[in-house]
Amino acid sequence: MRVLFTAYPERTHFLLMAPLAWALRTAGHEVRFASQPKFTSEITQAGLTAVPVGRDRDLWQILSRDPTWLGQADKGGMPLPYDVADMAPEEITWEHLSQGYAAQVERWHKTSNVPMVADLVEFARHWQPDLVIWEPLTYAGAIAAEAVGAAHVRLLFGIDMYGVAREHFLRLRDERPEGARTDPMADWLGGYARKYGFPFGEQLITGQATVDLVPECLQRRAAGLEYLPLRYVPYGGPAVVPAWLRRPPQKPRVALTLGLSTTGHGGEYAVGVQDVLDALGDLDIELVATLAEAEQRKLVRVPDNATVASFLPLDALAATCDAVIHHAGFGTLATTALRALPQLTLPWDNDGPALADGIARAGAGLVLNPKEATGADVRDALVKLLSDPGIRQGAAGLRDAMLAQPSPNAMVATLERFTAERRGRSSAAASTVSGG
């Protein structure tokens, strides 16, 4: 079958999608990966066939001018209205959801999708994919799939705040008077449905199903949606393992890594790196800190027990470590979890705090607020992390939960069946409409 992947140009998201694309390709299926033109080299560097669509538009350029653009920068965590995934149902209001959706359709979703839609639909009509796999905010993928009658799924690699928010929105919308049921998402996506000749449905927002990389013990799912669990496979792009990393450490090795996305787009780490390095300098450990070069230039000193590098392949580094300190980005968190390592998380942005809370609930690590934690706090938490056998046991349990999920190779058969069923229904429906 022909499988079309699509995502807006965010490297960390693409890296999480690539292993499934490889699995489908090596199983004999035709695979294409569509994104904005500037992202072509990222796709081809991974050995995948790129389809440039639309024009380049960078949401990060807007965020660099206005960090509050998505509505969460002042408090961290998930942007509105998706922050309802962290709220009790009785605390969630119609006003919060409807106003949040109205803001994000204009600010976020149109920015990321409108530049791609027309070209993506044109390519889909030309290539005729059987299945479209789209990153959870690349609604252009769902539009293109529906326009050509392809099966389609979201590929989820974080808290399903989008599905949970939509579930609460629909619940509260149905409680509203008939004339007061505003729906910014349906108004926006419904316009594309009319343009390309298919009926609007909730599958445009949450997919016909959801492939989910997040183990259920960390996830927050929406009732009524179909989830297809998928095992995370570490992939960080082209990398070289240095010779020193292949030598066994002489002391407990701890990795400190604070992510690629923020500094890659001109931002700063939420935690004071110099303070952390100073506080850990007297511990009998080997600290390996992977820091962006811009952050390295801010350092006044590096302790004798620390090695600072711009980049190391995280899976190779984690294989030599006893613990990892990180920002709770899903790729870092999942790579650490697969090695059954205790984790000290310093989350701030997006779903990082929710994922970090899940790590703590699973007994696999500890969590600190990076805006409040001092270097001494990090030191105390790390000492506990390295000495508490219960945390290591919790980390082993989390690893087992991740390994219990189907591998990308196993997921291929699931997607083949799903596509055949969905395509079969579409053909039957078309036949009924035409009188066949």
Image (cartoon, helix red, strand yellow):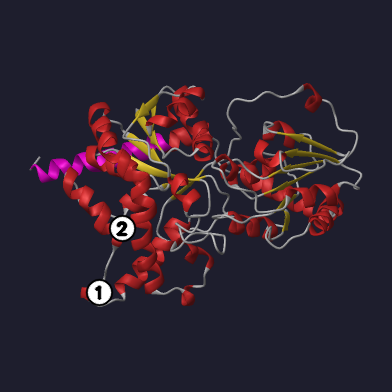
Image quadrant of residue 337?
A: top right
Frontmost residue, 274 versus 218: 274
Q: Helix, strand, or loop for circle 1?
A: helix
- Side (left or right) of 406 relative to 61: right
- Side (left or right) of 1 relative to 19: left
| Residue at mark 2 | 185
Question: In the rendered structure, which disc, 1 or 2, sits on the residue that comes first in sequence?
Answer: 1
Q: Which residue is drawn at 31% across and 58% down?
A: 185
Placement of 264 over or under 223, stated as above or below: above
Neighbor class of circle 2 (other Cα within 10 Å; few <14, some 14-19, many 20+) is many
Neighbor class of circle 1 (other Cα within 10 Å; few <14, some 14-19, many 20+) is few
Q: Is residue 30 visible?
A: no
| Residue at mark 1 | 180
- In magenta, the rendered stretch is 415-434
- Side (left or right) of 169 relative to 288: left
Q: Position of residue 304 (x, y in %)?
A: 89, 38
